Amino acid sequence: MVIWVDADACPKAAKELIFRTSARLGLPVCLVANRPLSAPPSSLISAVQVRAGSDVADSYIVQHVAAGDLVITADIPLASLVVARGATALDPRGEVHTVDTIGERLAVRDLMEELRWAGVATGGPAAYGGADRQRFAQALDRLLTRRGPVS
């Protein structure tokens, strides 16, 4: 299992939690972004900088993710693509996306985008806070505990 991180928009607090989890469980983490990233020195943590452009980091993750991997992303279309490849997607706010849930979440995302284009809905998500970090930590722990002991 690899933990893939769509790192361009992943909150720092979530990344720090992922790094600690990686060290504790011995799980590899790959950060993917289109800008330089800093990561703690660890043989378990790698960073891939892709070229600039819309969805280039997403495409990299989709091309390299394997069934059973975990992808950390707030990007619903990316979550849909990795779930279709047998991975689990986890939003940095703690929402788990699976085959059973991603269709509805994608439909809601598309509806909200249409409303924004029509000028009905504006604004984005609230700032990332302590409650978000706690939900993410709990969801990450549940997902990794469910997979069983690390070999």
Image: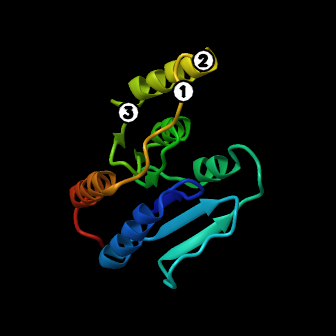
Instruction: In this rendered view, identify the residue nearer to me: 42 or 119.
Output: 119
**Coordinates of residue 42 in the picture (x, y in percent):** 49, 83
Please name the residue that numbered disc 3 is placed on. 99
Q: Is residue 59 left or right of residue 15?
A: right
- Amino acid type, callout 1: Thr
- Amino acid type, callout 3: Val
State which quadrant residue 18 falls in: bottom left
**Coordinates of residue 53 in the picture (x, y in percent):** 76, 48
Q: Nearer the viewer, mark 3 or mark 2?
A: 2
Circles 2 and 1: CB distance less than 8 Å? yes
Q: Name the image quarter holding the N terminus.
A: bottom left
Instruction: In this rendered view, identify the residue nearer to me: 102 or 128.
Output: 128
Q: Name the image quarter holding the C terminus.
A: bottom left
Residue 50 numbered mark, or none? none
In this rendering, the answer to whether 86 lies above or below 3 is above
Q: Who's the residue at 59% across and 75% down the image?
A: 38
State which quadrant residue 6 falls in: bottom right
**Coordinates of residue 52 in the picture (x, y in percent):** 77, 54
CA distance separating discs 3 and 2: 31 Å
In this rendering, the answer to whether 133 lies above or below 122 is below
Q: Is residue 32 left or right of residue 138?
A: right
Residue 122 numbered mark, or none? 1
As helix, strand or loop, the secondary structure at mark 2 comes to loop
Sooner in the amino-acid sequence: mark 3 or mark 2: 3
Circles 1 and 3: CB distance less than 8 Å? no
As helix, strand or loop, the secondary structure at mark 1 comes to loop
Q: Who's the residue at 41% across and 61% down the image?
A: 14
Residue 119 numbered mark, or none? 2
**Coordinates of residue 98 in the picture (x, y in percent):** 36, 37
As helix, strand or loop, the secondary structure at mark 3 comes to loop
Q: Is residue 1 visible?
A: no
Q: Who's the residue at 55% across and 17% down the image?
A: 115
